[in-house]
Image: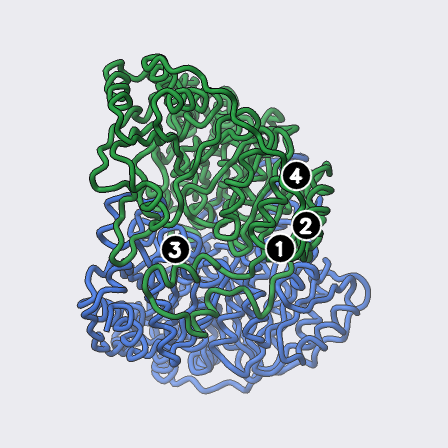
Chain colours: A blue, B green
Amino acid sequence: MNGAQSLVQTLLNAGIDTCFANPGTSEMHFVAALDEHPAMRCVLGLAEGVVTAAADGYARMTGRPAATLLHCGPGLANGIANLHNARRAGTPMVNIVGDHATYHRAYDAPLTSDVEGLARPVSHWLRTSLSPATVGRDGAAAVAAAHGGQIATLILPADTAWGEGGVVGKTIPPPDLSAVPEARIQAAARWLRNGQPSLLLISGGALGEAGLDAAARIAAGTGATVMCPTSPRTERGGNLPYVERVPYSVDAARNRLAGFRQAILVGCRAPVAFFGYPGKPSEMLPEDCRIQVLTRPGEDPAEALLWLAEDLDADAPPPPTREAPPTCPDGPLTPEALAAIVARHLPENCIVADESISAGRAIYPTTRHAPRHTWLSLTGGAIGIGMPLALGAALGAPGRRVLNLQADGSALYTLQALWTQARENLPITTVVLANRAYAILKGEMSNVGAGQIGPRARDLMELERPTPDWVALAAGLGVEAARAGDAGALDRLLEAALSRTGPFLIEAVL
Amino acid sequence: MNGAQSLVQTLLNAGIDTCFANPGTSEMHFVAALDEHPAMRCVLGLAEGVVTAAADGYARMTGRPAATLLHCGPGLANGIANLHNARRAGTPMVNIVGDHATYHRAYDAPLTSDVEGLARPVSHWLRTSLSPATVGRDGAAAVAAAHGGQIATLILPADTAWGEGGVVGKTIPPPDLSAVPEARIQAAARWLRNGQPSLLLISGGALGEAGLDAAARIAAGTGATVMCPTSPRTERGGNLPYVERVPYSVDAARNRLAGFRQAILVGCRAPVAFFGYPGKPSEMLPEDCRIQVLTRPGEDPAEALLWLAEDLDADAPPPPTREAPPTCPDGPLTPEALAAIVARHLPENCIVADESISAGRAIYPTTRHAPRHTWLSLTGGAIGIGMPLALGAALGAPGRRVLNLQADGSALYTLQALWTQARENLPITTVVLANRAYAILKGEMSNVGAGQIGPRARDLMELERPTPDWVALAAGLGVEAARAGDAGALDRLLEAALSRTGPFLIEAVL
């Protein structure tokens, strides 16, 4: 058994059964080993940003890491932006990065680079595997490290892969989440009983059904307000209580949070501004708001909320009133009309991969009355996640429909994901919000006080001259597509697209 | 004057007049400063791999660095693969990487990352500019560092950009190339007179007209063989002597170089295998071949060759015999037919941006009799350079035609470059070599002894199911395109495309 074979078998034994890949020469023995193990599903991405975001989407839906296969420093580098996002989402992932044979490094061949140096900023766990005899053990350690929501990167020199003497690594069981100490539950309960305006900010594992129900009990029993930051995964709709999101804009967030005197954090940190702005604060909570941390990393936020609800003796409120879907809007396709149309058609059990950025801000609140669904967000701010995140989510949750709400500027970073959507024939409906600009920057230009937008600055923020044609781009990558120029057209196209078995893209011209 | 304004003025004073950009919020003040300085040409790339490779192509043609503008760690990361290529090409470049305001970093906002950690592996010079008062000086130092063929990365926190008190940095004149010591010239001459089979391996500045002519004199006078590695830029065709390239494949290279007993290196290092292969050597020169280094970094290879030719008292050989262009091949589009068609139509003064990889290997030797042209190669092995390299070359050499010979798998990494080609209406003709596979990997699978390609491995190397449609992809990004299914069609399309004023893409189906 060579090192590559021992590593693939180790990954399979540890429960990793999907490998998103963009291989090169130094990975050929690993590819040969993948070929011998049909239990490992291999999915090709035509650019590494597709590979890493797909692994993120897969893990968000399964709770288990996928593997990625990347080629040397440059291949890894192409995937780093979406590794950054995965790191910010607390996503488990195991990256296998092929590199030169150990003895070949000394020759400084053209592709030689500091792979560890590139991997370190985005990896919680990092190791170069130097021998076929130990690569199995290294692989098992990587999977164990990933399981807690970490990025584990294993660098695989070619001779470690091709050398004989591989030993399958023993699976290391993932640690259970710890229970929150009783004293912290009681401390939170004391605050919630003191009558002060209280914010219960919940994220991570708290945004599943159990956590949401417990948070709603706490809110009903104490008058606290439940909110969430932009979170990796949120269960929503149906009979689940609605949780308001902290606004993106620092002014809006400061305004919304102004009245709170105490905040209890569950599975998240205190909210901060996405960027620093001249003369504006970095923190979103009021200066006089005291903060208590209910759960720490490695603890179970949903269980903590349940205990807290019990401690408070809080009863479940009646299920939220569900409004009827909005009627179909007429006329031009405004962001508000688009939000109403999405809310009209969002199917039961759908997964929303949301990279809608500025033009999509209305969609989240507008879909609060939709049937039960799962919402995946961009939590790291590196654009170009949406299309491959949708791809990975679809592979991680077979049988579920995926709706990708996708800003056009961001989509252009990783449009190659459409090709894999087509190859795997996945039920992904993509709505490209085509405002033909980095629209967020136009707003930010005034937020940062940088003055009026001149023509040369405007040229750096607009996707005009020429206008990207998403129907052609999708067709070029094997995905059928159509363009919606007004609200009625989008309504009809979306309804039809959501019933197709394979992928479909709608360019929604805003 | 704020920091951003002082930095833009510093760059302009130091001779940088082009900025390839993909900005974000933290760069808004720098963008505003660009807007105020019309002397700085700003070129938007829709992904950062486009930005960095375009700056590479620009510098290869002008000999001067361009600036890039990148957004935080993830934006930089997206550009790293082509920074790796630029580093391997010895390209001068100044990267401005925006980052959070210094005081905001402590809040670990979503986009916070270790920007220096990501930049270090691809930067010869690296600095974070901490104050508006010093950012001008830092910018001048960055340009000075870049001028010797280095990657200089200046990280620009948002408050350094927006803060008042900017001071324009004083331009630091670039150092001249040093002359090669007389003793080294004489040592090389002694070897070349001793009658042993000699290789003169030349690259870098030796591949311009002066260096090529001097090398031809030395070869004619001594019987030495002149060859070059895959090099960033080579002048070719017309009356220039033809220089054979060292083959890519380690077996072919070892075979070709087997007879040499001594090698003199001019502007390059001893050739090594691109990858390590089981049982094959890493070095391409024979074990008993002794090596002499004629020029070191910072010295002038062309001048060294001229001195050496003088020292050897070598006369200029007659200009090379130029064969008539090949006739138009009939029938299917083989790699050989494609090479002949390119050789038939390569226009005088054309710039070839070559990322043709496996299917294009025949083109370089076949075009040896073409009119005078410039050849730009991929020297770092990170694929996805060709389309943006062509873009940058066209901007760096106004009035010259650019022909991008482009492998399809590699093209899919940075196809966004087509959009900028259209926006700037550049005379770039792209020929996509559509073999619909990572064809090089199929060969490498047997080169590394990884056995037969099974169906699951094959799926990771083929761009089938679906087949990318390059005519649609180009149209989607605003570039007219057509498909050539046989040799005659390519011949007609290429001739027509080369006379257009703007960009055109031909999908050559192999």
Residue occupied by mark 3: A76
Of helix, strand and loop, which one carries label 1? Answer: loop
Residue occupied by mark 4: B345
Q: Is residue B365 visible?
A: yes
Give how far across and how far down residue A229 sits, in percent: 47, 64
Gap between marks 1 and 3 measured at Cα: 35 Å
- The answer to whether B453 is drawn above or below residue A416 in the figure is below
Chain holding disc 2: B
Gap between marks 2 and 1 measured at Cα: 8 Å
Residue occupied by mark 1: B333
Residue occupied by mark 2: B490
Gap between marks 4 and 2 measured at Cα: 11 Å
Q: Residue at x 48, y 31 (%)?
A: B242
- Same subunit under labels 2 and 1? yes
Give how far across and how far down residue B417 sits, in percent: 59, 46
Binning the other alpha carbons within 10 Å of mark 4 as few (below 14), some (14 to 19) or many (20 upward) gives some
Q: Can you tell which quarter of the image residue B277 is in?
A: bottom left
Left or right of residue B291, residue A414 in this image: right
- The answer to whether A323 is drawn above or below residue A196 in the figure is below
Q: Are marks 2 and 1 in contact (CB under 8 Å)?
A: yes
Residue type highlighted by circle 1: Leu
Left or right of residue A243, residue A42 in this image: left
- The answer to whether A328 is drawn above or below residue B3 in the figure is below
Of helix, strand and loop, which one carries label 4? Answer: helix
Give how far across and how far down residue B251 sits, in percent: 34, 51
Chain holding disc 1: B
Gap between marks 3 and 2 measured at Cα: 36 Å
